[in-house]
Image (cartoon, rainbow, N blue to C red):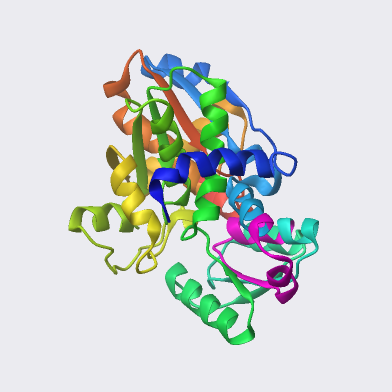
Amino acid sequence: MDRDRLPANIVLAANRISSHVRETALDRSPWFSEASGCNVYLKLENLQYTGSFKLRGAFNKLLSLTPEQRRAGCVAASSGNHGAAISYAMKKLGVTGVIFVPEQTSSAKINAIRQAGGIVQFFGTDGLDTENHARAYANEKGMVYLSPYNDGHVIAGQGSCGVEIARQLSPVDVVFVAVGGGGLISGIGAFLKSVNPDVEVVSCQPAASPVMTESVRAGEIIDMPSEPTLSDGTAGGIEAGAITFDICQDVIDRYVLVTEEEIGDGMRQLIDSHHMLPEGAAGVAIAGFLKTASDYRGKNVVIVVCGGNISRDTLKKVI
């Protein structure tokens, strides 16, 4: 992928998918602003159709396929949100396919995939194992594999969130984004830095699954185990050769790791102050901000609330 063309491709993606996705609100948060001394804005991707930002990349990828590829059908691997987004987009566009999910995927996300029309199959306990199996299945069946992050069209689609942020607020001084495979932060970071090179892009990850953070620190994608985390949407390994790795090295300015207690606290604060249900990954971005807020007093801060698909059991645990 030509990284120099990524911002232009993100603009093209934003235009391509505009009739299929919701332009989500960027709401100023009195609660987080007053508590931190920052001007805090929440990018509410939890209110996106299917409940997460993943719909952006799903539509952009599917709309980029040839008629022959669409007829062949598609295969995706997902901890839930990517699968629900792909299922929703495939149904809207008349494409058939199957979604592989890790065995421990939350019931809320599995139900979301099925409600969107997707066929669910289980494989593995780590997201990377599930991805590898899904890719092999697609190759064997002559179908199109739809990566959750390791694809230029997916990254450009996720970057449309950054196009909206830039239109909704100026200047953006710092943006906090939860990171798993890196597709969302790659797209948002690449676009916002093309508009304002001085914007600070902060990666937030659970300490229980810090694969991108540790990979960047090591200078290469590493294979490491992930512990259980509230942020199932960011958990698991990164595919070898993932194009997001180099982009993350280019666009991310700061890496913040947060504990499960900090994630839970971030989720509870959003629930109490805004009466919204964030999923664990959204709690990671909030926790990352809360952990570093004193460094950004007086700044315009954007926290990407990336999704709201949380199961009742997890919600009970958090509360």
Residue 51 lies in magenta, yes or no? no
* Horizontal and vertical percent position of residue 197: 34, 28
Instruction: Say left or right for 166 vs 24.
Output: left
Identify the main secondary structure in magenta: helix
Q: Quadrant of the N terminus?
A: bottom left
> Residue 295: image x %, image y %?
27, 23
Q: Left or right: where does residue 107 sit relative to residue 196?
A: right
**From what the image shows, is residue 312 above or below residue 284?**
below
**Residue 66: percent from the left, percent from the top?**
69, 65
Residue 28 can be seen in this image: no
Task: Return the x and y of residue 25 as percentages of the image width and height.
Answer: 63, 27
Vertical placement of residue 64 versus 47, above or below: below
213 or 192, which is in the foreground? Answer: 192
Asked whether, in this view, residue 247 is left or right of residue 76, the answer is: left
Residue at (62%, 47%) from the top-left corner? Answer: 56
Q: Identify which residue is drawn at 57% across, 30% down.
A: 164
Between 49 and 57, the residue placed more toward the observer is: 57
Q: Which residues are magenta?
A: 63-88
Q: Is residue 80 magenta?
A: yes
Q: For the point 35% across and 12% down, which residue is it?
A: 298
**Residue 195: in sight, yes or no?**
yes
